[in-house]
Image (spheres, helix red, strand yellow):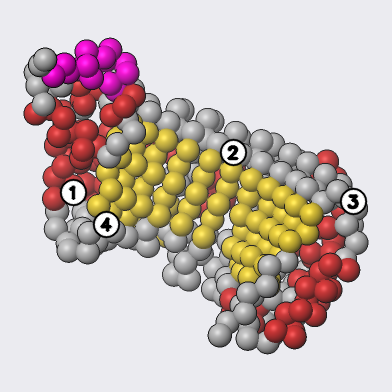
């Protein structure tokens, strides 16, 4: 009995759903299977390009540019580009991003560590009415927000080691994301911002934000402070997940970190916060311990707190730190406290 090609008999909608789950490079190769498959991939609503080879060339951008020229879907649900070593030019990145925004992209992810020059994203990115998720990563990728940005649908924003045009670029961006629910920022020491402050002004609110991660680094030791965090918490009324991650140097050295007892408790602690995580917790400074104690003592809905002490070869010191954490009062009697011990050898 002759083999029956049952896959080719499937409806186009199902074929597109299947091709959306694989990298675009593989989806494109299906065009050689038969006439039936010839143009199916050009209607795929999700495009994913990933090239992490160590040898550098321009092949990945040739693929991206050519496939976008042939792409025929009226609406692009997502565009994901990860290029680690291949040669990348500003015009290539800008062209791809503009295409995505012009086709009503909902999810845009750029992870480009191989940029040979500074890249400014096209202005239409900051005025997208359809963008729901935006992920930017790359030391030469510049966040240059115009004076009147508007991202009414953006719910998830992740900024990893990008540069900022000026001190207020990130402020203008956050001020105009009223639907934001997830914010994750990892800073680089050369990101062109001396103080990265979220919600420093009481007028900036995040009424829909439910998940937030803060990374404390040593990029500006004289201004290391937890005060902006609590201003942020006051302006995030339904926050459910709070993660704090520390640069190891902050926990292992006697570096300045300011924090004062709050005059009023943020509403999210009283009624919404369920998960609190502190990664690489130093515990040597009074301010750190008081901050953790304050959150545990006021988070009435807390389900899980995970405090991970910084790696150290001093087991006795770490065990004492864990005992101090366990002795802290927790207003939520049902909450679980995890304090994993890891010792370097």
- Residue 107, visible in the rendered structure: yes
Residue contact at pointers 3 and 2, CB within 8 angstroms? no
How far apart marks 1 and 4 lie (CA) works out to 10 Å
Give the residue pinned by disc 2: 180
User: Could you tell which of marks 4 and 2 lies nearer the N-terminus?
Assistant: 4
Which quadrant of the rendered structure holds the N terminus? top left
Q: Which residue was labeled with disc 1?
A: 60
List x then y, in percent, for residue 182.
Answer: 59, 43
Give left or right: position of 87 versus 312.
left
Q: Which mark is residue 333?
A: 3
Of tags 4 and 2, the one toward the viewer is 4
Q: Earlier in the sequence, mark 4 or mark 3?
A: 4
The region drawn magenta spans 3-16
Tell which circle, 2 or 1, labels the residue nearer the N-terminal end: 1
How many residues crowd mark 2 within 10 Å: few (<14), some (14–19), many (20+)?
many
Dot 3: element: loop
């Amino acid at each position: 009995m002759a083999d029956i090609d049952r896959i080719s008999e499937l409806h186009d909608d199902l074929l597109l759903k299947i091709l959306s789950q694989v990298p675009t490079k593989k989806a494109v190769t299906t065009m050689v299977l038969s006439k039936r498959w010839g143009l199916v991939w050009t209607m795929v609503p999700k495009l994913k390009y990933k090239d992490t080879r160590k040898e550098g060339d321009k092949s990945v951008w040739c693929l991206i540019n050519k496939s976008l020229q042939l792409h025929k879907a009226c609406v692009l649900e997502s565009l994901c580009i990860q290029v680690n070593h291949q040669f990348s030019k500003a015009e290539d990145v800008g062209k791809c991003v503009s295409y995505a925004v012009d086709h009503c992209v909902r999810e845009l992810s750029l992870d480009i560590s191989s940029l040979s020059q500074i890249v400014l994203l096209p202005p239409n990115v900051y005025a997208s009415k359809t963008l729901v998720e935006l992920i930017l990563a790359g030391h030469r990728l510049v966040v240059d927000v115009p004076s009147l940005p508007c991202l009414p649908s953006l719910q998830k924003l992740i900024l990893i080691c990008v540069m900022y045009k000026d001190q207020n670029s990130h402020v203008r961006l956050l001020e105009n994301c009223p639907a934001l629910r997830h914010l994750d920022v990892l800073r680089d020491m050369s990101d062109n911002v001396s103080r990265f402050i979220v919600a420093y002004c009481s007028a900036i609110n995040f009424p829909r934000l439910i998940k937030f991660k803060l990374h404390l680094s040593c990029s500006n030791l004289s201004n290391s402070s937890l005060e902006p965090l609590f201003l942020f918490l006051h302006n995030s009324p339904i926050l459910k997940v709070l993660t704090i991650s520390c640069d190891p140097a902050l926990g292992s050295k006697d570096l300045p970190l300011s924090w004062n007892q709050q005059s009023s408790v943020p509403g999210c602690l009283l009624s919404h916060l369920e998960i609190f995580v502190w990664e690489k917790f130093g515990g040597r400074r009074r301010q750190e311990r008081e901050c953790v104690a304050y959150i545990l003592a006021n988070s009435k809905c807390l389900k899980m707190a995970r405090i991970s002490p910084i790696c150290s070869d001093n087991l006795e010191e770490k065990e004492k730190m864990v005992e101090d954490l366990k002795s802290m009062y927790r207003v939520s009697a049902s909450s679980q406290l995890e304090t994993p011990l890891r010792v370097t050898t």
